[in-house]
């Protein structure tokens, strides 16, 4: 067999590493294809077998690259989700700590959860949940109120918590306020009065 196969041009130095296996396998397949065209019928069977092996090598290289890319994408997505979950947990813990401090300052307060009602949760332009709060003083003298409002998802998991001070509210009257979350939330958000005291 006298026909010569011209050498392949060298790959650019800046080619991506993942393209190398494809270039090698594809080059092999092309070279063997040219060899098959120039061979006699007695050697065509061997050349065909070699070409088949090269094609299999190319397919394996592509599968390997696809697997690596998929693995890297899955890893990146997992890292992003972990970071988001960590940030959310930290924000909730910080809000709960602030709420505990606020109620610790309300010394001598009596339970007033029944004096507080909430409206419908809405989302502000900044993405933070907010809900109208109405406090009704059923006592015979003016009272101040400290109210904790929890924002939760549809499964009941805590997303955020807010403490607000209302009053003094005159005896027999009501006062309105708005509880606004500390951070942007998404999805279905519900609000509830976790605790309230009057003093």
Image: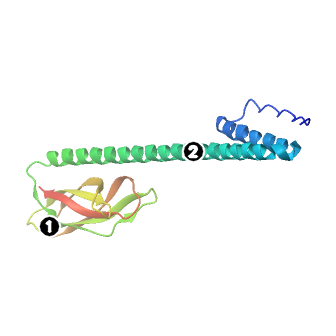
Q: Position of residue 92 (x, y in %)?
A: 30, 48
What is the CA distance from the residue labelled 1 to the residue labelled 2?
57 Å
Check if mark 1's residue and mark 2's residue have beta carbons within 8 Å. Answer: no
* Front-lying residue, 49 or 174: 49
Q: Residues within 10 Å of mark 1 (few under 14, many from 20)?
A: some
Which image quadrant for residue 34?
top right
Left or right: 139 as drawn, with respect to 191 = left
Residue position for label 1: 114
x%, y% of residue 131? Answer: 32, 64
Using residue 68 as the reference point, say whether residue 191 is left or right of it: left
Mark number displayed over residue 69: 2
Q: Quick check: 178 left or right of 15?
A: left
Closest to the observer, 198 or 98: 98
Query: In x, y percent, where is residue 19?
Result: 68, 39
For the point 78% across and 43% down, the residue is 47
- Which of these two is toward me, 51 or 113? 51
Q: Which residue is drawn at 87% across and 34% down?
A: 6
Residue with the most extreme right position: 2
Q: Which mark is residue 159?
A: none
Where is 118 relative to 181, above or below? below
């Amino acid at each position: 067999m006298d026909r010569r196969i011209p050498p392949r041009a060298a790959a650019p130095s800046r080619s991506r590493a993942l393209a190398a296996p494809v270039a090698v396998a594809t080059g092999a397949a092309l070279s063997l294809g040219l060899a098959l065209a120039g061979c006699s019928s007695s050697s065509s069977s061997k050349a065909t077998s070699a070409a088949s092996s090269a094609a299999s090598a190319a397919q394996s290289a592509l599968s390997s690259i696809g697997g690596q890319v998929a693995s890297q994408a899955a890893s990146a997505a997992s890292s992003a989700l972990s970071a988001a979950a960590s940030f959310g947990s930290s924000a909730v813990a910080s809000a709960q700590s602030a709420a505990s401090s606020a109620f610790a300052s309300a010394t001598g307060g009596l339970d007033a959860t029944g004096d507080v009602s909430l409206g419908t949760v809405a989302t502000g332009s900044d993405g933070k949940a907010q809900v109208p709060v109405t406090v009704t003083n059923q006592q015979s003298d003016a009272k101040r109120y400290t109210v904790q409002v929890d924002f939760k998802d549809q499964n009941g998991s805590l997303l955020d918590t807010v403490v607000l001070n209302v009053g003094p509210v005159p005896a027999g009257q009501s006062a309105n306020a708005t509880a606004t979350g500390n951070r942007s939330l998404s999805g279905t958000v519900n609000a509830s009065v976790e605790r309230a005291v009057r003093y």
